[in-house]
Image (cartoon, helix red, strand yellow):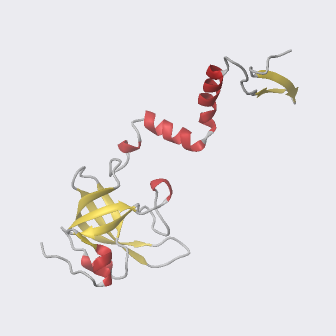
Amino acid sequence: MVSPSRSYMEGRSAGRSFEVLCLGRGLFSGPKMKKDRNRFRWNERKFKTRELKRRQGGVLKHDPLRGSTQAKGIVIEKVGIEAKQPNSGIRKAVKISLIRTGNKLTAFAPGDGAISFIDEHDEVLVEGIGGRMGRSYGDLPGVRYKVIKVNGVSLDEMVRGRKEKPIR
């Protein structure tokens, strides 16, 4: 009889064998349960992607914000980005050079007429746009960030007419 605390080979179906996992039961089953947990964690998609990224130098290697939630940058130019199908329209965005890292990225200017409050050489604060796993959102191809402040004043407040843009 095979002890229930061990995994063992059982049955052969269509020429293939498969492994049956039995839970460890007993006084000294702790190390086996720990080993099984470490092995089967690799079947979980989120764990696997996170661990592989960490081993390659991490997400930080490819993330322009270097792991932080927000970053300041200087506006290089205003751009219009065409929306993906089936939507149509030109979404207003800005190209930014980040102060800390020098990386260049594109950030969306949310709000009706928000682009009129942003000029070249303004200092803006950007954050992630809210897509899945740090990716782009909605019908904006390749845009992963949005502008939240211009020269220290909230862009949303300026769009609503509550505050005016300061002169630098």
Query: How many marks on residues?
Result: 0
Residue drawn at the location 59% of the way across and 29% of the way down? 38
Q: Quadrant of the N terminus?
A: top right
Residue 36: image location, x then y, percent = 64, 27
Identify which residue is drawn at 37% across, 49% down. Answer: 63
> In the rendered image, which quarter is residue 18 located in?
top right
Tell me which corner region of the image, top left, top right, bottom left or bottom right, holds residue 145.
bottom left
In the rendered view, would you say 86 is above or below 15?
A: below
Q: Residue furthest front?
A: 27
Q: Is residue 83 left or right of residue 21?
A: left
* Name of the residue lying farthest toward the left: 168
Percent x, y of residue 70? 32, 57
The residue nearer to you, when weighing 100 against 142, is: 100
Give the percent coordinates (x, y) of residue 7.
75, 22
Where does residue 22 sit, x and y in percent of width and height? 76, 27
Q: Residue furthest top?
A: 1
Q: Residue furthest bottom?
A: 161
Whether residue 111 is situated above or below residue 105 in the rendered picture: below
Residue 152 lies in quadrant: bottom left
Residue 74 against residue 91 in the figure, above or below: above
Which quadrant would the C terminus be assigned to in this image?
bottom left
Camera-side residue of 35 and 131: 35
**With 73 as the anchor, is 6 left or right in this view?**
right
* Residue occupying the point 46% across, 57% down: 135
Is 39 positioned to the left or the right of 73 in the image?
right
Left or right: 49 as drawn, with respect to 156 = right
